[in-house]
Amino acid sequence: MNTIYDKLDQKGKTVIVTGGYRGIGLGIVRNFAAAGADIAICGRNTEAGEKVAEELRADHVNCRFYTADITDCVQIDNFVENVVRDFGKIDVLVNNSGITDHTAAENINVSQYDRLMNTNVRGTFFMSTAVGRHMMERQIRGSIVMVASMSAFLANIPQKQATYNMSKAAICSMTQCLAVEWAEHGIRVNAICPGYIQTEMLTEDLAAAWRSMTPMGHFGEVDDVGAAVLFLASDASAYMTGSRVIMDGGYSCI
């Protein structure tokens, strides 16, 4: 009989984590590394990405970094082809890359809007479809995990971030739609929706306000998100697809 540890085991699986060299992405990578996965990381910061990959290889993890801009569909396709060439297949995709913007809605210009939407929505969608096609062609019963946000379901205060919240709501809708469309192929699609997590992106001048509105009274850690993503990607969640799992210390309950 398989134990829960067997279901969480990722040995022999190839996992892509976009933006997996810092913050939440790094926490996700560390959890998959601990579970025995082979890991492909992509992003625009070559120096930071190569450093993380080198550190993981020193710890006997099969890991490679690829420089790629997910707003460019040609680069997405090249990245996926290179991962398949180097690792043989793709079992799990974690769409972690994303950016935010705290500009008031009436002051957002077209360039800001396009930059955020192209990264958070367009990049996530076309990375998903590129990997999804690979899984279908190889008949891989794969798993895709979106890193969305509790902000998909509420309007944050005191900061103003309408475009970010809109993009994360789009990712949650994308999760449901792809889950339904790809269920017949054995591909599961779920989303993790974190609240405020202790990363370098946490704005210190707003931290006190955010903490006061979080019932648990503290921020989450990147490894908390990483563990939840591992669960959603693994056989431990085999009957879950189209789910949007909120982990925010109770923030969205009040």
Image: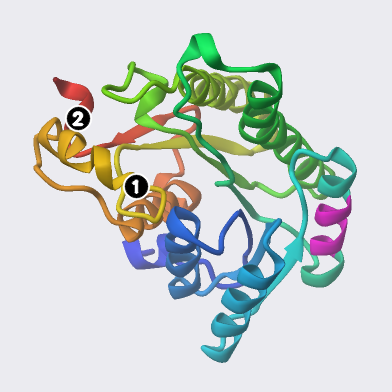
Q: Is 125 on the left or on the right of 153, as rendered? A: right
Give the answer, above or below, for where 228 lies relative to 38: above
Q: Position of residue 165 (x, y in %)?
A: 46, 22
Quadrant holding the C terminus: top left
Residue 192: mark: none
Q: Amino acid at mark 1?
A: Leu
**Dots 1, 2 in contact, CB < 8 A:** no
Q: Look at the picture and state if 85 lies above or below 177.
A: below
Residue placed most toward the observer, 156 or 208: 208
Residues packed near mark 1 inside 10 Å, few (<14), some (14 to 19) or many (20 plus): some
Judged left or right of residue 8, residue 59 is right
Which residue does the image show at 30% across and 53% down from the upper left?
198
Report which residue position mark 1 lands on. Answer: 202
- Which residue was labeled with disc 2? 251
Residue drawn 35% across the image and 67% down it: 5
Residue 183 in sight in this render = no
Q: Secondary structure at mark 2?
A: helix
Instruction: Write the residue at 75% across / 64% down.
Output: 66
The magenta-colored residue range is 78-84
Corner quadrant of residue 17:
bottom right
Question: Going from the N terminus, do you reach mark 1 or mark 2 first?
Answer: 1
Q: Is residue 201 left or right of residue 101?
A: left
* Amino acid at circle 2: Tyr
Question: Badge 2: few (under 14), some or many (20 or more) residues near its Cα, within 10 Å?
Answer: some
Task: Find residue 197 and report its horizontal and vertical position in percent.
Answer: 31, 48
Q: Which residue occupies the foreground of this view, 157 or 54?
A: 157
